[in-house]
Image (cartoon, rainbow, N blue to C red):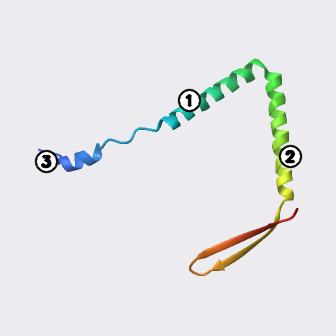
Amino acid sequence: MEPPISTRTTERAFAPTTPPSIGSSIGALLGFFVLVSTALVAATYPLAALATLTALVAVLIGLRSLAGRTRGTLRRIDFPGLGTVEFRFLRA
């Protein structure tokens, strides 16, 4: 016969875990609701959904091109034993 499992190992293996917070459950529920409602609206109004998607892509491309214009110079100063400090100088 096999030796019985000690209670010390069993207690650690089956220790109760903390339940998920209510905030994460509500966030997941709202996210699921938004996803389902968006899919239903897109299926009901396909042309409006296509126009919205096209506009969203155009806005994202525009924001990305604007973000590319604000590039500047990056300076790094290394302090031995402390770390590295980075300075970014942006052009207006």
In this picture, is 80 found above or below 1?
below
Mark linked to residue 62: 2
On the image, which quarter does residue 67 sit in? Answer: bottom right
Q: Earlier in the sequence, mark 2 or mark 3?
A: 3
Image side of residue 6 versus residue 31, left or right:
left
Q: Are marks 3 and 1 in contact (CB under 8 Å)?
A: no
Percent from the top left, x then y, of residue 73? 81, 69
- Identified by mark 3, the residue type is Pro
Question: Residue at left 86%, top 64%?
Answer: 91
On the image, which quarter does residue 4 sit in? Answer: top left
- Identified by mark 1, the residue type is Leu
Percent from the top left, x then y, of residue 66? 86, 52
Q: Which residue is mark 1?
A: 29
In this picture, is 37 found above or below 13?
above
Q: Counting other residues with Cα less than 10 Å from the Cα at mark 3, is it few (<14), some (14-19), or many (20 or more)?
A: few
Q: Nearer the viewer, residue 22 or 9?
A: 22
On the image, which quarter does residue 92 sit in? Answer: bottom right
Cα–Cα gap, marks 3 and 1: 47 Å
Percent from the top left, x then y, of residue 57? 82, 39
Question: Residue at left 46%, top 38%?
Answer: 21
Q: Nearer the viewer, residue 92 or 50?
A: 92
Q: Tag 2, which secondary structure?
A: helix
Image side of residue 10 versus residue 69, left or right:
left
Q: Counting other residues with Cα less than 10 Å from the Cα at mark 2, is it few (<14), some (14-19), or many (20 or more)?
A: few
Q: Nearer the viewer, residue 31 or 14?
A: 31
Q: Which residue is mark 3?
A: 3
In this picture, is 60 found above or below 84?
above
In this picture, is 59 found above or below 70?
above
